Image (cartoon, helix red, strand yellow):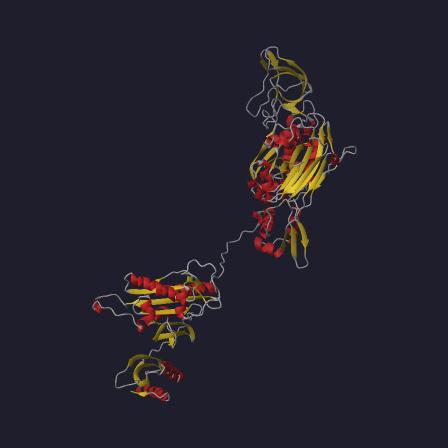
Amino acid sequence: MIITRTWLSEWVNIDDKNLELLVKTLNSIGLEVDKAYSLKAPNNVVVGLVVEKEKHENAEKLSVCKVDIGTEILQIVCGAANVAQNQFVAVALNGAKMPNGLEIKKAKLRGVESNGMLCSSVELGFGKTNEGILVLDESMGELELGRKLNSYNIFNDELIEIELTPNRGDCLSVYGVARDLAVALELDLNEKKNFKESENALGIGRILRLGVTRDLNSLLMYRAFELKEKLHNKLLINLRLAQAELLSQNPIENLLNYATHSTGVLFNAYDFDKLKKNNDELNFTLDKEEQGESKISCQEELLSISGIYQNANSKCDEKTKIVILEAHYTDPSVIAQSKGKYKEVDEKTFYRSFRGSEPKLGVGMDFLLQQIATIQDIMIYSSSQQVLDYKKEQIITISIETINNTIGQNIDKDEILKILKKLGFELLLSNDGLINIKVPLHRSDIKNIFDICEEIVRIIGIDNIISKGLEFVEKNHLNQSYKDYKELLNLRQNAVNSGYFESLHYVLDNEKELEIFGFDKLGLKLINPITEELNTLRSTLLNQLLNAASLNAKNSQKIIKLFQSGAVFNAKNEELHHIAFIHSGFKEEAKIANKAKPALVNFYDFLLDMRNILGTFELKTSNFSFLSPYEQAYIYKNNQKIGFLGRVHLNLETQKDLAKSYICELDLKLLKNEPKTAKPYSKFPKVSRDLSILAPKNFPYENIKEAIQKLKLDLLENFRLIDIYSDENLKDLYSLTLSFNFKSFEKTLEDKEVNLCLDTILKALEELGLKLR
């Protein structure tokens, strides 16, 4: 984005601000300055008037001119084709040093004396405005013969080139930059006068009518003017456009470019005569297209897609007499969605509309008409045709406290409100202390409270925000999900350490095979199962583990230890998370210690594995049809049933071609490891005693355990069953050997104290009908 000081001064008074301050301020508010330098015509270049022009007698392409510089008339030989009598020109006098290093001296050209040089804009160090010499006019100020050219503001200027970020389309104009700069420098924008209509002008309604579809995503405004003579733009316009690298050969296009670069409003210009055909009146139809873009057409002929491109057949050229002006704005999000739909795209128009052009069409149109009104032999039609019904601006609700917390510094409420108001935001204060901030259309990049805070910070200046050390505060991630994950990870690691391999399967299973286990069927049915073998959600992990073990057995694996965790589903279609284990085949590998004849796994081997994986637990009788009736139990932990284990029923082992196999399945939700609590340890030795009692073969061990625990003997540290014996002499009785450990925290126990405890235990067992062996 290229601007100059004089151009910027038309919008905001910066006469007392030097270039260094302007650059520093622009950089501080996020408008990064890429280049900034003085743009000044050389000394000894003055305003002159060509009073006479004659052809050089010795050169066809040279002219001999008499040039009045106020104090004298100079004879200057000039090679420019466009030099003519009565032109005001820039005259470089003898001694003038040009930007390209040339020093002007008195000379003879083809035998004719020349005192000075008539300059082009390029020779003066400015952009190229035309072929040949620079022709001056009063758009630069009152022309005074002999006056130094660099005493005129536009020839003693400063150029600033700003590198804008893509989100700042609102600053793709001199007006947009001035709007931000005025806020930062605490200045007011210059008041712009509205274009004053001519009283006797014809109305635009004589030549243009609009037909509009509702809910357009665009704003549109139409005006018209008629050219009586060929259009020539003023020097001021051409010189500024040349500096901004926007000057073209089409004078009407140059007018539009100048108005767009000045105000940010986008324009199209249509040639009336190309469109009218047999009518004296044009009917423009404005339609909303599929992607939300606005299509402008005339008698079913496409004229333009607003913000994307204009049909070349409708554009103005050197023969144009009546011009239909169109100022337009389209929602940038609509432009973004629509570009790929069209092969023809005007890149300059798209660049501005995609980033957000200026929506205040009246500002741009009034500015353009004021430039047109200064040109002779032009008639501007009165009134306008317009479509200004558009969606409401976005509203962001925020509190001063939230703003300050986000910025990290307390800023006075009045200061915040003043900044936002000067940036064009409308503010509505509510009773609860909140501020409803209405975002102006030209700030399409403002979406949330953080964007609002960024606006405040860039105007205050990031250097004015107090530096603070970084504070790294991380949210505590130790929630229940994390704890569940860690417990499962620990179980899996324990299983691997105990020699088990993890098995993975689909959450789907075979409904017919699941019937063997006797669990309730799911209430849901799969309408379109993947295969017949995977036709239902699984209700247990055991079937898949048994099938995996069977496959391993058929591949000559002798020791099969697998586990799996995952989702299962109950009859209410509720998702549960289980973990299951299987140990099938031998207990260990063949080795010297077992004489190469390892034993098959047994119930106690499997229990030991489960204890190493799960920790301590208790067993109670169960009754599952798919398990051996002699080797199965529920697993209790912390007095809560968490699952079951047991040997696979012989019939099921045979069906799956498995050797002796044990399985276990647990509900992970119930399997919670209790926190480890440190307990005091007695420094005195423990005393162990064994008791062998006779009990009926059908007598539950749980009854014995409960009877002893109810005694709550302080000296009894623990007890456990260490042997079960039976022979023909005992008939229907078992000999159960219990081991008891006694300990005191105060002294070494004496035999009589231990015997007293044993007598109490025997008495309790006798009440159950049991006796010593």
**Percent coordinates x, y for residue 438 in the rendering:** 65, 50
Identity of the residue drawn at 58% across and 12% down = 110
**Percent coordinates x, y for residue 735 in the rendering:** 29, 83
Number of numbered labels in the structure image: 0
**Residue 443 sits in quarter:** top right
Is 105 above or below relative to 325? Answer: above
**Percent coordinates x, y for residue 728 in the rendering:** 25, 84
**Residue 504 sits in quarter:** bottom left
Residue sitting nearer the eye, 429 or 534: 534
Q: Is residue 100 left or right of residue 763?
A: right
**Percent coordinates x, y for residue 533 in the rendering:** 40, 61
Q: Is residue 38 left or right of residue 756?
A: right
The residue at the far right in this view is 200
> Can residue 465 be seen in this snapshot?
yes
> Can residue 358 be seen in this snapshot?
no
**Residue 311 sits in quarter:** top right
Q: Dividing the image into 4 quarters, which one contains the C terminus?
A: bottom left
Q: Dividing the image into 4 quarters, which one contains the N terminus?
A: top right
Residue sitting nearer the eye, 49 or 427: 427
Residue sitting nearer the eye, 650 or 268: 650
Is 284 above or below relative to 559? Answer: above
Is 83 above or below relative to 635? Answer: above
